[in-house]
Image (cartoon, rainbow, N blue to C red):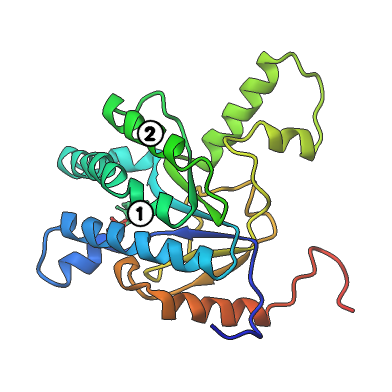
Amino acid sequence: MNRELKIPNHVAIILDGNGRWATERGLKRSKGHDAGFKNLKTLSDYILTCGVKILSVFAFSTENFKRSKEEVDYLMNLFVTGFKKERNYFVERNIKVIFSGRKVNLRKDVVKAMNELEKITKDGTKGILNICLNYGGQSEIVDAVNNIILDGVKEVDEETFSKYLYQELPPIDLMIRTSGELRISNFMLWQLAYAELYFSNTYFPDFDEKEFDKALVEYTKRDRRFGGIKK
Ligand code: FPP
């Protein structure tokens, strides 16, 4: 890794293009999800080893339930088996895994696998992998507002509001979307306020360490002013 590169504190990735990756190879879409999961495992370790402290990834949106039952079931089964199988991988690499999203209407076995992975990795100190599953940015804000009302709080500022989000995380510095789509798709709307955006044409299963390094090169060139004046 090039030492001149600026390392963002919090990186977010919209993992897109698994389906197209598979279709272009004459495979079923599910094979693309398998390949995406495999890639996320090694890529997350690489990114956190580079010095990034938090990596948030969009694994399943609240809107993804509109996909065919076959695909939704496949993904849920992949989460259950994948989270169980890879427990040691994350523990050995000192990675703390957390989840963001609505657990209430997820299958019980999925929630169980999520809770177990969170518990077994809770002491990880290298970095945090925040997996957004059954997640929507607008739902997160609505859920926060409802919890604020339930707590009887009459007025909030940005700092207090942030504490009501699914996880207390610092702002996102760099947001990457793979596969050539140029959208935010209801991902971490609050946390993305001043993020630098990077779009790659590569499908997620092929978005490897080299592709991530390219994003870092681009991020290093960005002049982040947070609404201030260029000095
Ligand atoms: C996006 O590709 C991928 C998803 C909606 C599925 C979730 C991601 C994975 C299984 C990989 C990582 C896994 C975890 C647990 C974080 P797409 O299906 O939208 O592809 P397309 O746009 O080409 O159809």
The answer for how far apart the CA atoms under marks 2 and 1 are is 14 Å
Check disc 1 and report the residue beneath it: 89
**Which numbered disc covers residue 209?**
none
Q: In this view, does 141 lie to the left or right of 63?
A: right
Front-most of 13 and 92? 92
> In the picture shown, does residue 85 fall above or below 38?
above
**Which numbered disc covers residue 116?**
2
Query: Picture coordinates of residue 105 (x, y %)?
Result: 36, 25
Q: In this view, does 131 lie to the left or right of 2?
A: left
Ligand 1 positioned in quadrant: bottom left
Q: What residue type is labelled 2?
A: Glu
Query: Picture coordinates of residue 108 (x, y %)?
Result: 30, 24
Q: Which residue lies furthest to the front in this view?
A: 92
Sequence-earlier tag: 2 or 1: 1
Residue depicted at x 31% and y 50%: 86
Q: Is mark 1 on a helix, strand or loop?
A: helix
Q: Is residue 128 left or right of residue 172?
A: left
